[in-house]
Image (cartoon, grey):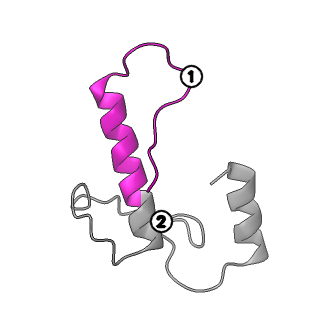
């Protein structure tokens, strides 16, 4: 189990920021594992994808896709 907190903050983080972070992390996990058991925040997934990078389907990624992912820090 991992616990994630926003870094670089000394003060209470606004709940909207926490909600945005939670949504992003759930959607990222769902893109890696479509069988994810968490169903919260998975109803309104974005329709866009970047093949081999974000919600880009299954299969082996190309060298270009890997390089782009690394360059973007994803």
Indicate whether residue 17 is drawn in magenta: yes
Name the quarter where the N terminus is drawn. bottom left
Residue 16 or 10: which is nearer the viewer? 10
Name the residue at the top extreme.
11
SS at circle 2: loop
- Mark on residue 8? 1
Percent position (x, y) of residue 71?
75, 52
Name the residue: 34% across, 48% down: 23
Look at the image and say whether residue 9 sits in the magenta stretch: yes
Figure quadrant of residue 29: bottom left
Residue 62 vertical placement versus 26 (above, below): below
Q: Looking at the image, is mark 2 or mark 1 earlier in the sequence?
A: 1
Q: Where 62 falls versus 9 (above or below)?
A: below
Q: Which residue is mark 2?
A: 49
Magenta stretch bounds: 1-27
* Helix, strand or loop status at disc 1: loop
């Amino acid at each position: 189990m991992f616990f994630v907190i926003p870094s670089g903050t000394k003060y209470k983080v606004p709940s909207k920021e926490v909600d945005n972070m939670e949504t992003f992390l759930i959607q990222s996990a769902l893109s890696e594992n479509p069988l994810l058991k968490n169903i919260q925040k998975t109803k309104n997934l974005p329709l866009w994808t970047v093949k081999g990078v974000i919600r880009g389907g299954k299969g082996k990624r190309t060298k270009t896709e890997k390089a782009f992912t690394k360059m973007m820090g994803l």
